[in-house]
Amino acid sequence: MKLAIIGKPQCGKTTVFNAAAGQQEAVGDYSQALHRAVIKVPDKRVDRLAELVQPDKHTYAEIEFLDAPGFTGKGKESTGLKVTNELREMDALIMVIDAFSPEANPERFIGNLTDEMMLADLVVVENNIENKSRKLKLTGDKTLQMEIDLLQKCRASLEAEQPLLHLELEANEEKRMRNYQFLSKKPLLIMLNIAEDDLPNQDAIYQKYAHLIQPGKRELATLCGKIQMELATLSPEEQQAFFEDLGVTASAMDKVIQKSYALLGLISFLTTGKPDVRAWTIKYGTTAHKAAGVIHSDMERGFIRAEVTPYEDYIRYETIPALKAAGKTRLEGKDYIVQDGDVILFRFNV
């Protein structure tokens, strides 16, 4: 999973990046700096299975974070937003919003940043309409007309100030649109960066802006980036003591990761064995046949069956013989829909 952290200068996006990635990049007015980091996704299921199996190693799922160059924050008046290829390649965007300063106006800031993304997309749309129309006249290629029709739908949506994420399209149009990697088409996690003094009011602040949530399109989270960045420098024991002082049970960054998974419709299945205990990330709705291919193409090509055990049962019975004796391990075919937390052994032959 690839997530870009975006925001206007001084919103705290690099602070949030440091908190998420355990980095120590300079913070302040460095709005055009770009930082990248890959982090391991904390997963207690991997830890517990590793305790049981005692493998040579255990491997967590990974997230790539990109701290993108800052937006101007000028909304429709923006003229110089630089959109990098790296930003367009991200799976989703984390929009960090200043909710801590005296000038904070989250809904206006969200609107301004969304306007900038739509303007950047509109430039791409108009350039492609012009280029493809010219090519259509020269070649008569009818498939280009389909592409132009799709782009004209996009232009109408953007000119009506509607992000492309809300544009209703046919399945074949959705597939073709992916090639353009439009910013306003990407799922969005709005992250309200609050002041330390507002931590006791965190739930109330979240509820105030909960109307912005649109399942599968927009999610919302609140955190204090400054506190989270400080937490990232502490040992697990020190972090736990900090949580107890605050009366919380988990890092806000862990919640951000969970919301990002939910936003993108992602789940994890697990594999065990002496070489490795590992979490694998897939889209919800993935079949066992396709999940096998995430591990290796040979597994997908030679798929025979999947031996599936729910994680909770694996932890309860602890060993393969005990699981089989209790009838907790099922044999599933290639059309089985993998569930979050399934522990799977794939049988295959190539």
Image: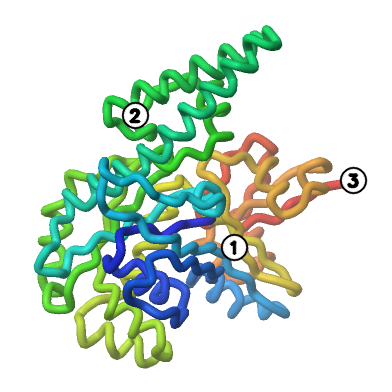
Q: Which residue is mark 1?
A: 279
Label 3, residues with CA under 10 Å away: few <14, some 14-19, many ≥20: few
Q: Which residue is mark 2?
A: 158
**Amino acid at circle 3:** Val
- Front position among marks 1 and 2: 2
> Which residue in the protein does label 3 denote?
350
Q: Of the residues under marks 1 and 2, which one precedes in the sequence?
A: 2
- The quadrant in which the N terminus is found is bottom right
Residue visible at 34% across and 64% down in the picture: 255
Packing grade of label 1 (10 A; few <14, some 14-19, many >=20) is many
Q: Secondary structure at mark 3?
A: loop
Please provide percent x and percent y for residue 30.
38, 71
Rounded to the nearest whole Å, what is the CA distance between mark 1 and mark 2? 39 Å
> Which mark is nearer the camera, 3 or 2?
2
Identify the residue at image location x=38%, y=66%.
31
Of 70 and 264, nearer the camera is 70
Q: Earlier in the sequence, mark 3 or mark 1?
A: 1
**Image quadrant of residue 102?**
bottom left
Q: Secondary structure at mark 2?
A: helix
Q: Amino acid at mark 1?
A: Ala
